[in-house]
Image (cartoon, rainbow, N blue to C red):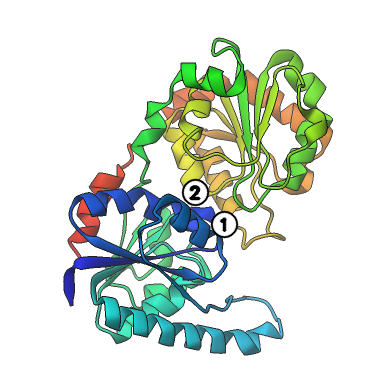
């Protein structure tokens, strides 16, 4: 057992990697050697390798866990078993004193291997209800941290606790001047930022295009359309700029944004809440996900933090109507947002996480 080594896992979507990205620098600053286990070709591989090129990344096999019938349900358990064996080999070589899992299917073999190796596991669940991977992995974890207090009711309560959202401090360091340089916009004019998450948002992108003339008449629009979705025919449109994907630029773009239109991944919406940005949330439908974003969005609607438009009801007309509703209710939404509970920083979460180290 190497007390100076900690292993992280999580993948499948950017939301299953972002917290890991936030705490890696904190752990490195404390003198820990960090290793990462992810899939061969998931988004986590590029996010970790691109942002932390010197950090050892170990790829393993993983199978998707499904609640519905599929012939792959017969083959994927063998992938999970093989991935567990691969993870065991990594753990034996690396000998970490702690495994931290952010969830996603790739984390299940890692958590199983850690349990077999008698290495403590800590899990973080950011959605209102836990995903299937975390439900399974939670049985083998030392502790499960949640964002929502309600989530604890779905988990073994004796080892689960709600700690609120973990927000990256750099989001508060945005510069209006840098944003103006990036966009060519005027920071004093009302601006909408639109984003669809790492899984893309074709319907949102289409709604923006269909309403672009009306939107740009009254607002500046920053459109994060997703990789491969840049529409070159819209380049040069007044009061409109599109990016496929941003990383370091995001704090600056959010700085000048008066409104956010987004999917309803837990990490992102809590960041917008902390920044006090009125939101129009268009969650992934239950046909495209397990329904976690719908629950997240409806919770924010119930609390008064956001306006919600279900994807099934998304048309050019309902979209512009929802934007109008968002603008009209801006002050009321921000008043509610200011009453929200405070979040934790990655540094505070790291201190909490390390208490479980062996």
SS at circle 1 = helix
216 or 269: nearer the viewer: 216
* Residue 200 image point, x, y percent: 67, 49
Name the residue carrying label 1. Answer: 292
Residue 170: x %, y % from top left: 37, 34
Q: Are marks 1 and 2 in contact (CB under 8 Å)?
A: yes
Q: Quadrant of the C terminus?
A: bottom left
Can you see residue 82?
A: yes
Quarter placement of the N terminus: bottom left
Rendered view: 48 above or below 139 = above
**Can residue 258 be seen in this snapshot?**
no
**How far apart are the two marked residues, 1 and 2, measured between alpha carbons?**
9 Å
In-front residue for pair 356/2: 2
The 10 Å Cα crowd at callout 1, few under 14, some 14 to 19, many 20 or more, is: many
Q: Where is 247 relative to 104, above or below?
A: above
Q: Which mark is residue 266?
A: 2
Seen at 49% across and 37% down, the residue is 303
Disc 2 packing (10 Å; few <14; some 14–19; many ≥20): many
């Amino acid at each position: 057992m190497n007390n100076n080594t900690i292993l992280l896992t999580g993948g499948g979507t950017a939301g299953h990697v972002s917290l890991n990205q936030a705490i890696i620098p904190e752990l490195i600053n404390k003198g820990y050697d960090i290793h990462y286990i992810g899939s061969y070709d998931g988004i986590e591989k590029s996010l970790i390798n691109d942002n932390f090129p010197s950090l050892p990344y170990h790829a393993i096999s993983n199978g998707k866990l499904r609640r519905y019938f599929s012939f792959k349900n017969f083959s994927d358990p063998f992938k999970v078993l093989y991935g567990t064996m691969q993870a065991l080999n990594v753990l034996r070589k690396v000998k970490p004193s702690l495994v931290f899992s952010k969830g996603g299917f790739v984390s299940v073999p890692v958590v199983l291997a850690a349990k077999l190796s008698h290495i403590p596991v800590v899990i973080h669940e950011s959605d209102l209800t836990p995903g299937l991977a975390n439900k399974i992995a939670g049985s083998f974890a030392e502790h499960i941290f949640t964002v929502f207090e309600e989530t604890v009711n779905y988990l073994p309560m004796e080892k689960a606790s709600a700690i609120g959202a973990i927000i990256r401090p750099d989001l508060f360091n945005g510069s209006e001047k840098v944003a103006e340089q990036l966009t060519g916009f005027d920071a004093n004019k009302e601006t909408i930022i639109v984003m669809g998450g790492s899984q893309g948002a074709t319907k949102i992108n289409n709604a923006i295009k269909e309403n672009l003339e009306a939107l740009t008449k009254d607002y500046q629009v920053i459109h994060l359309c997703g990789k491969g979705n840049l529409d070159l025919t819209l380049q040069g449109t007044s009061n409109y700029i599109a990016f496929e994907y941003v990383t370091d630029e995001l704090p600056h773009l959010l700085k000048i944004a008066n409104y956010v239109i987004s999917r309803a991944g837990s990490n992102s919406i809590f960041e917008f809440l902390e920044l006090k940005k009125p939101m129009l949330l268009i969650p992934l439908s239950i046909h495209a996900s397990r329904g976690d974003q719908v629950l997240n969005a409806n919770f924010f609607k119930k609390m008064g933090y956001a306006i919600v438009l279900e994807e099934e009801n998304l048309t050019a007309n309902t979209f512009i109507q929802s934007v109008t509703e968002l603008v009209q209710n801006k002050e009321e939404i921000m008043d509610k947002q200011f009453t929200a509970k405070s979040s934790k920083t990655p540094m505070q979460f790291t201190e909490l996480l390390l208490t479980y180290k062996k």
